[in-house]
Image (cartoon, grey):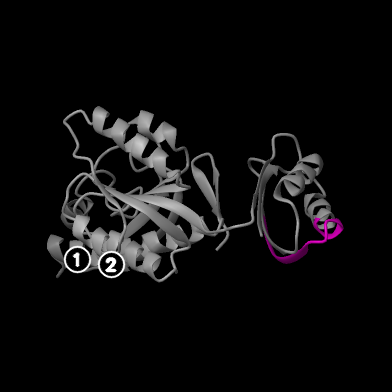
Amino acid sequence: MIVIIQCRDQIGLVADISRLMADTGLNIVSMREHVDNAEAMFFMRLDVDGRSDEFSLTTELLKILPEGADVHVNPVPDKRIVVMVTKEYHCLADILIRNNFGTLGASVACVIGNHSLLQKICERFEIPFHLVPYEDSGRNSEMEIIQLIGSYDPDYVVLAKFMRILSPDFVAHFPNKIINIHHSFLPAFAGANPYKQAFQRGVKLIGATAHFVTDDLDEGPIIAQQIIPVNHSFTAVDMVKSGKEIETAVLAKALRLVFSDRVFVQGNKTVVFE
């Protein structure tokens, strides 16, 4: 059982929580905690062994924690996701393979695409594919997608190279639930064509960033990042090829962290217990 706690900091929290777990007959297998001194916020992830009612444990924790505490008790850690795509296959293919072999940490409920190019690979893995072409405004398309996602009731929405900007209204339906992979080491080269921007700038490192989606384009809380070296011999096309490999790796890492309840969102930052 995974227990997630996020609250205002105060003296004795670790002792009080540990004592409650013992009194409830739960053995702490692992404990990770962090205090953000600047914001006076406390974060904890507990992996506990034993039997306890989810509602009762949450209620008892809220009694000993500061007012306004956010507590989640997750008896079943596996999550349910909806994946959104456009034309690029590399991130989706990795997700589908991990899903097929049970190593994703989540189950893929469906894939939604604004082009039909990736429908066949979804059919090979027996994953439902929904084609929702984007109109110029995108408003009607977004409403259709919101309804589709709602029908599957996922824990998260994963943008596996979904190359459209989502409206604030869409994002508001899924706060801190939309995960995106951006083909740049943010905050550098945000927006479109980052590899072209990197090539023109003559950088010696390129990277990828997985982050939660907010109203600010490519500025949401960062979950994971990674870089690889490049040099003067790399063309913009070479950077794109190398970038796809790192995008796949970074998204996979970010999803593993999120699905195992290791990521806390605080404002525009994250606390990540790797």
> Is residue 75 covered in magenta?
no
The amino acid type of the residue labelled 2 equals Glu
Residue 205 in sight: no
Q: Is residue 267 above or below residue 84?
A: above
Region of the chain picked out in magenta, as a range? 21-33
- Direction from residue 206 to residue 42 in the image, left or right: right
> Is residue 24 covered in magenta?
yes
Q: Is residue 206 above or below residue 164?
A: below
Residue topped by disc 1: 241
Where residue 3 sits, quadrant-wise, is bottom right
Instruction: Give the quadrant of the C terminus.
Output: bottom right
Residue 237 at what x, y percent from top left? 13, 62
Instruction: Give the quadrant of the N terminus.
Output: bottom right
Where residue 183 sits, quadrant-wise, is bottom left
Q: 10 Å neighbourhood of mark 1: few (<14), some, or many (≥20)? A: few
Distance from label 1 to label 2 (Cα)? 7 Å
Q: Are marks 1 and 2 in contact (CB under 8 Å)?
A: yes
- Direction from residue 124 to residue 214 in the image, left or right: right
- Identified at 16% across, 54% down, the residue is 117
- Identified at 44% across, 50% down, the residue is 222
Residue 199 in sight: yes
- Identified at 49% across, 41% down, the residue is 268
- Identified at 83% across, 51% down, the residue is 16
- Number of the label disc, if any, that sits on residue 245: 2
